[in-house]
Amino acid sequence: MQGMDSTVRDDYLWLLSESAQPLLNQAGEDFRDKVNALTINKRLRKTISPTRAAIVIEQVMLRLRAKAKFAHAGELFFTRKSLEQATSERIARHKASRFANLSSVADICCGIGGDLMALAGRETSNPSSAETVGVDMDELTAMFANKNLEVLGFEHAAVTQATFEDFSLERFEGLHIDPDRRVKNRTVRGDFFQPALTEIRQRTSQEQSLAIKVAPATPPHRSTPADAETQWIGDNRECKEQVIWSGPITNNPGCRTATYVNSQNMAFHFTATAKELARSRPKPPENLGAAVYEPHPTVLAAGLVNPLARKLGLRPVDGQIDYLTGVPAEKCKLIRKFRIDVELKLNLKLLSSELRRRKIGHIVVKKRGVDQAIFNNIKALKIAGENTATIIATRHNGRRLALITNIERK
């Protein structure tokens, strides 16, 4: 929906107006009270058109979904696509901190403003003169992003509807660019982004602070400078995005970084150089330790398991399997501990018998290095009991094991 016809535009302008707010609020309350969507729709159609009733319901449903990403989701505006692609508030704030004290920043392909709102709220020496501009080629998305800035009170920020090619970049100290990775089909290849990674490099200078948001699985691109930093960022137990940093705000030139941002907005990092990445993988130990450790998904996505293992004095449980074992040399938020309570040969009868003996009736199953069928069969075991545990199916020195870990007794 790059451009809208006048009727559609009028409907969405109405949605953004004060006239629509009571209806949005009431529909939101109805959804929270579990009122049927058809009932809500009938109520709305008593006072507004079927089209406007539909967009009110859609907006309320998107706001409910957006709560996982935005603290003020109930006041903001979303499109379905832009919500899916939007950076969460937590990660956006972390990224925006690198742009602190830059006087002019543009967020290109800003969507509904996940990153833009954080950039508009960045720390600057003179907030009243700091410039923040969002750019999106889609008219409706740009309208929503502009409204979202207004809702949150960012008076010195605005959104322009324009294409990447038509918008002038030269005057900005900092640029955040989130190229569209779903032009036709979803892709992780930089040549097929819109704009393509090569186009971005051609239109930006080395003096500009640049962050390019791409998919976690996007491979290295030939246009990326050797002194760029590639960062994988996640929250909870997910890797959400990859960011390619270049210019003055590059913290670790030529390195890879894995970052986990927790619910208190604290960021934990691990960085490795190309030399550290090239070192050989540590060998598995003869015996497993008292626990296995699962690296955070950002560490896995960044390919940093081996250097992190060396730093912590841990070793892989087997060959190319990315579970680690041993005793960590220091505390690290980028690994998750699973205390080994029982180590068994991977045999369903043995495992089932042990679970029954320990009254374990609730399990989480994880696997690395064994077939998916094994995972499915363990999950399908008929067990009963009040205790819980995590079952890890994996290999150690060629042996298939079932590890019963983190048993919790009720």
Image (cartoon, rainbow, N blue to C red):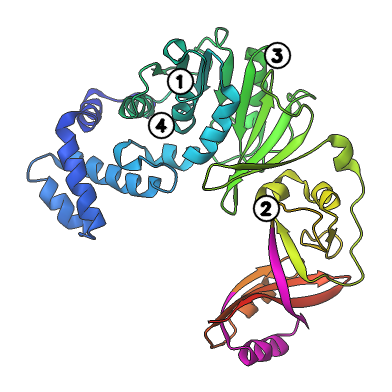
Identify the residue at horizontal 22%, vertical 33% (top origin): 15
Q: Nearer the viewer, mark 1 or mark 3?
A: 3
Label 4 or label 1, whichever comes before in sequence order: 4
Q: Which amino acid is tagged 3? A: Gln
Q: Is residue 80 left or right of residue 168?
A: left
Where is the N terminus found, in terms of image quarters?
Answer: top left
| Residue 307 falls within the magenta-colored stretch | no
Label 4 or label 3, whichever comes before in sequence order: 4
| Foreground of the two, 389 or 374 | 389
**What residue occupies the far left of the structure in this picture?**
46
State if disc 3 and disc 1 touch (CB < 8 Å).
no
From the top left corner, tell me how far across and down residue 176 is, in percent. Answer: 56, 24
From the top left corner, tell me how far across and down residue 234 is, in percent. Answer: 60, 45
Which residue is tagged 4?
112
Eyeballing the image, is 12 above or below 370?
A: above
Q: Is residue 380 left or right of residue 223?
A: left
Label 3 or label 2, whichever comes before in sequence order: 3
Q: Which amino acid is tagged 1? A: Val
Q: Is residue 119 left or right of residue 285?
A: left
Which residue is tagged 3?
206
Tell me which segment is drawn in magenta: 336-363
| Cα–Cα gap, marks 2 and 1 | 33 Å
- Residue 153 is drawn in which quadrant? top left
State if disc 3 and disc 4 touch (CB < 8 Å).
no
Label 2 or label 1, whichever comes before in sequence order: 1
State if disc 1 and disc 4 touch (CB < 8 Å).
no
Identify the residue at horizontal 67%, vertical 53% (top origin): 296
Q: Which amino acid is tagged 4? A: Ile
Secondary structure beneath label 3: loop
